Amino acid sequence: MKLVVQVKLLPTPQQAAALEATLHAANRAANLVAALAFQHHCFRTFDLRKHTYDRIKAEFGLAAQAAQHVIKKVCDAYRTLHANLAAGNLGKPGSPRRVKAVAKPVSFRPLAAQPYDDRCLSWQHDARTVSIWTTAGRLKGVAFTGSAEQLALLAACRRGESDLVCRDGMWFLHACVQVPDVPVTAPDGFLGIDLGIANIATTSDGVRHSGKALKAVRHRHRRLRRRLQAKGTKSARRLLKRRRRKEARFAADANHVIAKSIVTEAERTGRGIALEDLQGIRERVRLRKPQRVTLHSWSFHQLGAFLAYKAVRAGVAVIHVDPSYTSQQCSRCGTVDKRNRPDQATFSCTSCGFAEHADVNAARNIASRGETGWAVSHAA
Ligand SMILES: [Zn+2]
């Protein structure tokens, strides 16, 4: 399995200036290549290299590898654009968005990320430094830092390219790692996961990952965002962009913590993980409007993706089940009845009297559907 590990660079002011000058040069070169590609309708790496390679090397002071990467970056950007056009992601032919997208060459921000391969970037894991090519020559001994887990992963499994990224004045390397596949362990039962609003994730063991603290932070962010939007100045827009990224990081971090706790518990107990089919979540949950906004803006798909890759890495089986009526069905006797849910938080079976927190009851239903589903699909 391929993963991306992020490490933070700790350059001296001088090193940072060299990195900045390098990204500027690479992206000015990329903009030139993009303009030429657009002008000549030439989007293939091979052809484009023939026409631009010598020129950008000379004009922007790029090393051979850097020039190659610039050209490839431009081709990749056009490939993405063309794929998006073909998939209709930019609207129907003739729509303003689409017209705008095809009317001019793709462009790169001055500090857009730049790929590096092993010839222009080398890693000294013990010293925690990298040696990296810049337009001011090779920088040696640029310090980096990351979590212990990520650093170990990097030292053992790094393969291929890394991206040099500048964000909010900080420098990062996004490095590819190739993690060996772990065979899936035959599950002994399933841990069911119910997704929702009051509790982002509830397990069939009764562990609830509350959305309360997260919601408070998100509301604060939203109020601030509104104020900044109303202001509309350039600095307000810049601040807004930074807030948005900060909020995205915050949500991703919360999803990582939840996913890790769930996968660790499933692994420890030898169980698989049963999740509701995420497709259904928006249709399933009907709510008052303010809550609906919160739900739609929480990234359950991201949580699902984190769960999936952490499970693969641990060899934990994952199964998706049909979520219909999991909230109205009794996990003890199986009776389905709307009246089993007197309120949002309570489940109380009208048939057998079983009572439990509503989300825990739903998670138990998901766990047993997972077990059934797994038995059916692995009957042979
Ligand atoms: Zn019952």
Image (cartoon, grey):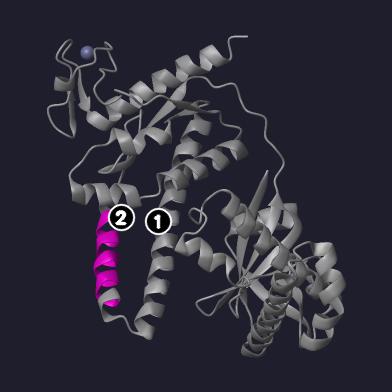
Say which element carries label 2.
helix
Left/right of residue 34 with respect to residue 304 in the rendered view: right
At 24% across and 68% down in the image, what residue appears? Answer: 223
- Which residue in the protein does label 1 denote? 251
Residue 217 on the magenta span: yes
Query: Does label 1 or label 2 sit earlier along the sequence?
Result: 2
The reply to whether discs 1 and 2 touch (Cβ–Cβ < 8 Å) is yes
User: In the figure, 36 relative to 343: above or below?
Assistant: below
Which residue, as the protein is rendered here, is positioned at the far front?
Answer: 94
User: What's under tag 1, amino acid-wise?
Assistant: Ala
Indicate left or right for 103 with 40 as reference: left
* Residue 249, placed above or below residue 350: below
Q: Which residues are magenta?
A: 215-228
Q: Is residue 181 above or below residue 370?
A: below
Q: What number is the disc on residue 214?
A: 2
Mark 1, secondary structure of its residue = helix
Using the rendered view, name the quadrant where residue 379 is placed.
top right
